[in-house]
Amino acid sequence: MSFFSGYWFFAYLAALLIPAAVLGLLEKPLRPYRLALTVFFIYMVYRDTPEQMKYLLLYAAGAAYLVKIYAFLRRRYGRTPWLYGHAVALALAPLVVSKWSAAHGGTVFGFLGISYICFRVIQVVIEIYDGVLEDVPVTRFLEFLLFFPSLSSGPIDRSRRFAEDDLRLWTRDEYLDLLNEGVYKLVLGAFYKIVCSALFYKLLNDVFAERYTPLYLVGYAYVYGLYMFFDFAGYSSLAVGTAYILGIRLPDNFNKPFLSVDIKDFWNRWHITLSTWFRDFVFTRFVLNSIRNKRFKTRLGGAAAGLMVNMLVMGLWHGPYAHYVAYGLYHGILLAVTEVYQKKSAFYRAHKDRLWYKTASWFLTLNAVMLGFLIFSGHIRDVWQAALYYL
C-alpha cells in the first residue's frame, strides 16, 4: 500500500473519512480521530517495509529532540549563528545521506517522505532562530511532522498555520464549507490522477518511448509535462481534500501553471508550497546575507544570483544526478534573465500589459517549461544525440 495509490488505500480512506465528517458536522473535536488515522495509515503504508518505518520513527524522534534542545539553547544563548547552523545541519544530514546513498544504489536512512519531513523540521528550526517560535510542544510537533495526507509528497504546510487548525473546533457551518471543498478536491484529484495521469503515462510508453527524432522529443516533452502535472496535481488535490475533511486546511499546490505568462509566474503557480518554501528560506536569506556582506554591487545582481542558487539547491534536492542539477540551473538562468529583463527593459515596461505581448510571452514560457520537463526526465542526452544526428 502507498499513500493515495491502490485500491486498498482508497477503500480504507473512503470508509474512515465518513466518521470524520460525522464528528465535524456534530461540532466534535477532530484532533483525536485525526491522530488515530495518522497512526493507522503510517502503519498500513510502512508495515511491508519495516526498515523504512524504523528510519521514519527514528528521524521523527530525533527531530523532536533536536527542536526541543535547540529551542532551549536559543532561549539561553540567544540568536547564535553557530548553534543555528549546527541545528540545520543535523536536521538536513539524514536527507543528504539518504539521497547520496540512493544515488549509489544504497538505502541508508531512506524512507518514503523524508524530503518533505525534512523541510518541516528545518522550517521549525529557522522559525525558532528568528524568534517566531519560542517552543514547540512535542506532541504538536509530531502531529505536524507526520500528518499522513501530506507525509510522503506534500503539500508543505507551515507549523503555525497547521497549529491554528489543529486546535480549532469548527462550527457546523464552517465544517460544512470544509467538507464541501474537501469532497470537491478529492473528486478532482481522483480524476486528475486516475484518468488524466494514466492517459498521458500510457501515451509516454506506447507512443513516445525510445523514439529520439526531434518531433518525437518535442511530443515527449509536452506529454511528460502534462503527465507530471496531472499526476502530482492529482496527488496534491487528494491530500488537500483529505486534510480538509479532517479539519486541516492544507495549502493548494497548483494554480493553472500552464497559463503562466512568464517563468516567475510559472513558479508562483507550480508546486507552490515548495517554491514558496525555497523563496522564504533559501532565496530571501541568501539575498539579505549578500546585502549585509556587500557581496554584489547591485541588489539586482544579488537577486539574480539568489535565483540561481535557489534553483540549483532545488535541483539538488531532487537528487544528486546530472539531469536534476541541469534542471535547477536551467530554471535558475531563466529566472535570473527574466528578473534582469523585467527590471531593466524599457520595451517590457512599455508593452507588458498588451494582449499580443502577453500571448507571445505565454507561448515562450510554455515551451521553455516543457523543455525544462524534458531535462528533468533525464532524456537531455537523447536531445543532444538527436541534434547531432540531424545536423
Image (cartoon, helix red, strand yellow):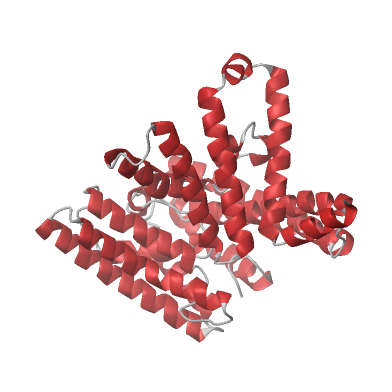
Q: Is residue 251 visible?
A: no
- Place of residue 254 in the rendered image (x, y in percent of width and height, measured from the top left): 59, 45
Tell whether 146 sits left or right of 89.
right
- Residue 22 coordinates in the image, percent (x, y): 49, 56
Picture quadrant where residue 63 is located:
bottom left
Say which quadrant the N terminus sits in: bottom right
The quarter of the picture where residue 341 lies is top right
User: Which of the pair 390/121 is nearer the observer?
Assistant: 390
Q: Is residue 8 above or below residue 388?
A: below
Percent coordinates x, y for residue 349 in the rendering = 57, 17
Residue 138 image offset from top left, x and y in percent: 27, 66
Residue name at image x 60 percent, y 20 percent: 348
Q: Evaluate whether residue 154 shows in this view.
A: yes
User: Who is closer to the viewer here, 117 or 381?
Assistant: 381
Nearer to me, 374 or 289: 289
Q: Quadrant of residue 15?
A: bottom right
Residue in the image at 50% along x and 41% along y: 177
Q: Is residue 337 left or right of residue 276?
A: right
**In this figure, what is the number of numbered marks?**
0
Q: Would you place residue 289 above or below residue 45 in this image? A: above
Nearer to me, 84 or 251: 84
Taking the spot 51% from the left edge, 57% from the top edge, the residue there is: 154
Report whether 165 appears left or right of 80.
right
Q: Residue at x 67, y 70 (%)?
A: 6
Apparent side of residue 166 relative to residue 189 in the rendered image (left or right): left
Seen as rendered, the residue at the extreme left is 76
Whether residue 180 is situated above or below residue 362 in the rendered picture: below
Above-or-below relation of 135 to 333: below
